Image (cartoon, rainbow, N blue to C red):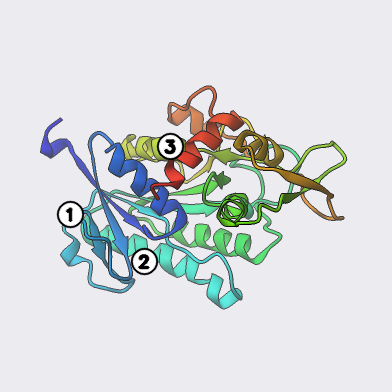
Amino acid sequence: MTVQDTKTVLVLGASGKVGRLLRAIWTAEPPAGLRVIYQFRETPPESPNCIRFTPGDPAGGLGRIDAILSLWGVTSGDDRALAANTDLALEAMRIARATGADRVLHASSIAVYAPSDAPLGENDPTGAINPYGAAKAAMETAVRSESDPRSCCLRIGSVAGAESLAASVDTYLAAKAKTPLTLHRFASGQGPARSYIAPSDLAGSIEALLRCPLAQLPEVLNVGASQPVTMDALLTAAGIPFEWQPAPKGAREIAVLNTERLHRITAQRHDDGDPGRIVADWLKWRARA
């Protein structure tokens, strides 16, 4: 592959949990045909591929960018704080236009959907039940109103190593007194079922979306493994002890995605939903992120 064939990709929000995992993977295993640049608001790591850039800065100094992965966003706070998700997504579109990028992949969330026990498909209704999901849905609406460049909102389930269960495991591993974790148990006898994806599988999916013909890039795309996994299965695979607690009224047992569209576009492994494989990949990159 020649230099001319290489696509330059700008990752906005490289300091976040998902950004750190992807940078660890792509530093150790550089993706073929992609040159990745990582954006930080504060002083970046000492690397030629890491830059300091604050929203609103002139984009002319970034040079030619072929595609943007927009991971930056706000996950908590009041409605005003969460509204920054739309502002940051539109800023990513501005940067794309200024640098000549033909596509922006925006990190959205399964939280935009109306709750359902059935696997949620991209054509199912949105109807977020929490402010974060509503803010991500508003972000999606805003970027769809932009005619250029092409955008794809990635409705991501749970990235192993970058969600609440991983935070609990990190706390457990760091503690001197190893108190077992607690997990909600539902009438089924299992813990919460979610659409997880291993960090390496997320990286591979994004690589495929960055390379695919523009006409094949959908406006929205669910991102997760082909099969859901329960949190108790992940903890068991990781060897982390836990104690059951009865799930409180209103707790959501099932929040899973239909990822058939993703698997038509990207070449996912047949065992991408295996708890042992998800945990092994998570722990592998946890130490490097």
Frontmost of labels 2 and 3 is 3
Tell me the crowding category of disc 1: few under 14, some 14 to 19, or many 20 or more residues within 10 angstroms, Cα based.
some
Query: Which residue matches tag 3?
Result: 200
Instruction: Inspect this view and state whether residue 54 appears.
Output: yes
Frontmost of labels 3 and 1 is 3
Query: Which residue matches tag 2?
Result: 91
- Near-viewer residue (188 or 174): 174
Residue at image x 22%, y 42%?
7
Residue 24 position, x and y percent, is 35, 46
Instruction: Inspect this view and state whether residue 120 appears.
Output: no
Q: What is the quadrant of the N terminus in the image? A: top left
Q: Earlier in the sequence, mark 3 or mark 1?
A: 1
Spatial CA distance of label 3 from label 1 is 27 Å
Residue 159 disc label: none
Kindly indicate the quadrant of the structure image that contains residue 15: bottom left
Spatial CA distance of label 1 from label 2 is 17 Å
